[in-house]
Amino acid sequence: MSQLYDSDNGICGINRRQFLKYGSMAIGTGILAACTNNSKTTTVIPSANSGTQGKLDKINFSIHWVAEAEYGGFYQALATGIYRDHGLDVTIKPGGPRGNYTLLLMGGSVDLIMGHSGDAIGALKDGVPLITVAAMFQKDPQVLIVHPGTGNDSLEKLKGKPILVGSGGEATYWPFLKAKYGFTDDQKRPYNFDVQPFIKDKSIIQQGLLTAEPFEIQKKGGFDPVTFLLADYGYNAYGFTIETTKKLVERNPDLVQRFVDASIKGWYSYLEEPVPGNNLIKKDNPDMTDEQLNFSLQKLKEYSVITGGEAKQMGIGAMTQERWRSFFDNLVKAGVFNADINYEDAFTLQFVNKGVGYYKK
C-alpha cells in the first residue's frame, strides 16, 4: 500500500501534478478520508488452511455502495472459497454515495474498483490511467421512477417535469436523456438518496436502481412505483464494471485474470444458490434483509441484467468493442465527450469473453 504522505510523491503517493488532475474527484469527501482505508466495514475470508495463507495474493477490492445483492457474485466468491481456489486473499471494501474510488485506486489503497463505462471514458479524458477489465452488468440498472396514475407512462412525457438526479447521473445518463428525449437542466433537482420526498409528492420523479429504490418505496410508501429501465430505452452503458490501473494490467495480468475469472464464477454460483453470498452480505451489512436481497436478485434475473446481451454466449463479464463504440458515440452526440478521444484505451477484452462453458466447468 502507498503511504498517506510522501515528500516526493505527495498525498497517497500521487505527485502534485497528478493530484491536481484527480482532485476534482475528491470533492465532498476530503482527501485524507479518500486515501485512508475504510476499516468500518470490510470482509476478509481467510484460507481454510492457514498454512497456505502466505501463498495467496492479497487483493483489496472496492465496491461503490454497502453490501447488497448487486455485489452478490463477489461475496459469493468469498463465501464459497472461489477466490481462495484461484490463489487470492480478497478483501471487499464497501463504499457510499460520497466515495472517491478512482482516487483510492490511483493512490494504491485498493487494487480494483467497481466502475461504469462512462466513468472509464471520463477518466481517460482526464488522463487518469485506469482501465476496465470486465462488465458484470450487461444492462446498467439505472431507472427513472414515477408515481402510478399520474399519466407519466413514457419517457417522453417526463420532459419538463422535476426529476431528482444524483451528481453521478449528470455526466452519464442525464446527457443521454437530454439528447434523445429533450430533457433540460432546469428539470433537475438534487437527489440525496432519500425516497421520502418522492413518496410525499406525486409530481416528483426520481432516479434509482432497478434493484433498490422501487423496493424501498414499496415498503415505506405502500405502493408500487412505475419504473423506466433506461437500458431498455437506448442507454447502452455497461454497469458495475471492474476497473484497475493500467500498471497492474501490464505488470501482473495473471493476477487480474484470476480475479476476473473467480468473480465471474462467483456470479454464476450466486445466481444458482445465493445463500452463502447473502449470509456474508448480511454480516457486512446488518441492515440488509432477506426480503430486500430476494427482491434485488429477482429483478437482476427478470431483466437479464447480468446474463443478457453478450453474456448469453460469451459469459458473464462480457464486453465488445462494438458496444463500447456505440456507447461512446451516443455520449459524443450528447456533448459529453469529444469525438477525438480514443475510447478504446478505456477498456481491454483480454480478460473476458471466454464462453459460458469456461466459467461453469
Image (cartoon, helix red, strand yellow):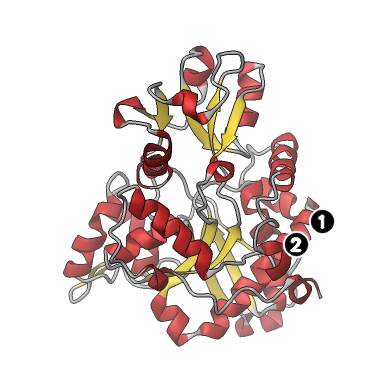
Q: Viewer-proximal residue, 290 or 235?
A: 235
Tag 1–tag 2 contact (CB < 8 Å): yes
Q: Viewer-proximal residue, 5 or 310?
A: 310
- In this rendering, the answer to whether 289 lies above or below 263 is above
Residue under the point 59% across and 43% down: 232
The residue where tag 1 is placed is 272
- In this rendering, the answer to whether 71 lies above or below 167 is below
Gap in Å between the C-alphas at discs 1 and 2?
6 Å
Residue 46 seen in this snapshot: no
Instruction: Please give the label number shown on residue 1.
Output: none
Residue 90 located left or right of residue 60 = right
Quadrant containing the N terminus in the rendered view: bottom left
The amino acid on which the numbered mark 2 sits, given as a three-letter code, is: Tyr
Q: Viewer-proximal residue, 344 or 280?
A: 344
Residue under the point 34% across and 54% down: 332
Residue under the point 62% across and 78% down: 258
Image coordinates for residue 312, horizontal then vertical, percent: 72, 62
Decide: few, some or many residues near mark 2? Use Cα within 10 Å; few <14, some 14-19, many ≥20.
many
Quadrant containing the C terminus in the rendered view: bottom right
Quadrant for residue 54, please give it: bottom right
Q: Viewer-proximal residue, 268 or 89?
A: 268
The amino acid on which the numbered mark 1 sits, given as a three-letter code, is: Glu
Residue 3 located left or right of residue 232 = left
The residue where tag 2 is placed is 268
Image coordinates for residue 70, horizontal then vertical, percent: 62, 49
Image coordinates for residue 182, horizontal then vertical, percent: 38, 33
